[in-house]
Image (cartoon, rainbow, N blue to C red):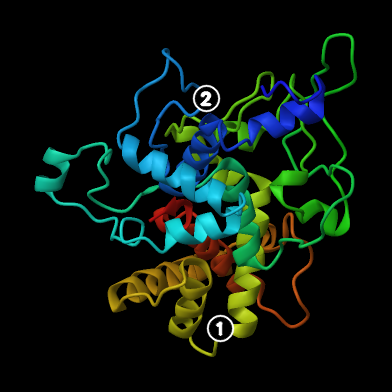
Amino acid sequence: MREDLPRNRLALAHWLVDDENPLTARVHANRLWQQLFGSGIVPTSEEFGSQGEPPSHPELLDWLAMELQESGWDQKAFLKKLVMSATYQQASMTTPELLEKDPFNRFYARAPRFRVSAEMVRDQALFVSGLLSDKMHGKPVNPPQPNLGLKAAFGSATDWKTSEGEDKFRRGLYTTWRRSSPYPSMATFDAPNREICSSRRIRTNTPLQALVTLNDPVYVEAAQALARKMVSSGGETPEAKVRYGWREVLLREPSDDEVTRITMLFETLQTEFEADADKAKEMATVPIGPEPKGASVSDLAAWAVVGNVLLNLDELFLKR
């Protein structure tokens, strides 16, 4: 630290971003790279010392750090530079030859392909179904979660009363979080418990994750909302509704084979739900609420299952 600066927190802040201290810029540039590419140039983004891994591209990291510093720490400009690079804009598809040469994509032979964060898994399902609230700031909220009937030691019950109105559908960022009882569906998707600072998340793949997106009330309600969008705005024919739903969820046109398979699924489900009114009523209205006036309950139930299928497609959760 410079001798002419006072020994206080402001001096520490100036020292951290001083041009003569390249470490801060290197660490921050590496973490921004990690957000976009799934892994940092230094994979151990929490450890740049002797206990961490060496950078795969040290000269690139140094250049990025200088770019960040010289831009006045303009993060938007820095991120724009990364996403406009030829490396980032590659296709994520691979070949046996590329897998043999670069199995972990440490040398960026292809574009990154990894699952989005726990908060984004939920946010994306709510967004494409039209439920996500864009309200900002304010107190934490309580989205739906399973009632377990448990109590924390020397504390209150771990269950909570679900928020009402749009607070029920606010972004995952605003979810109430207790270290002793984290929000279950996000914990399943590797959200840290916040007992310690975590600069990167280790991604896992388990059967529990599929069970969450198939059965958790949050995702069932999102599927029901998506079904109502497909019915009201998707067109007159089942094929048109399938194409509409596919575009809403995946931002691309489905192939003819994909349309045919999903349409067949809808028709099969519609027949089953027409034969079981109670089952159709539950699938179409729980937990989202009563069906729109004049709507066919069996149709809504069948489209809700279709919506559930669309919201569980690999493409929705993977950055590619």
- Disc 2 element: loop
Which one is in front, 264 or 98? 98
Going by the numbered disc 1, the residue's amino acid type is Gly
| Identity of the residue drawn at 31% across and 76% down | 255
Q: Is residue 293 visible?
A: yes
| Identity of the residue drawn at 78% across and 45% down | 174
Q: Position of residue 132 (x, y in %)?
A: 71, 61
| Identity of the residue drawn at 86% across and 22% down | 157
Residue farthest toward the front in the current orientation of the protein: 4
Q: Which residue is mark 1?
A: 234
- Disc 1 element: loop
As drawn, 93 above or below 155: below
User: From the image, which quarter does the N terminus lie in?
Assistant: top right
Mark sitting earlier along the chain (1/2): 2
As drawn, 148 above or below 66: above
Q: Which residue is mark 2?
A: 46
Q: Position of residue 229 (x, y in %)?
A: 63, 75
Residue farthest toward the top in the current orientation of the protein: 154
Is residue 262 found left or right of 200 in the rendered image?
left
Q: Is residue 280 visible?
A: no
Res. 100 mark: none
| Identity of the residue drawn at 51% across and 70% down | 270
Determine crowd level at label 2: few under 14, some 14-19, many 20+ residues with C-alpha closer than 10 A.
some
As drawn, 52 above or below 57: above
Circles 1 and 2: CB distance less than 8 Å? Answer: no
User: From the image, which quarter does the C terminus lie in?
Assistant: bottom left
Which one is in front, 307 or 6? 6
State which mark lies toward you, 1 or 2: 2
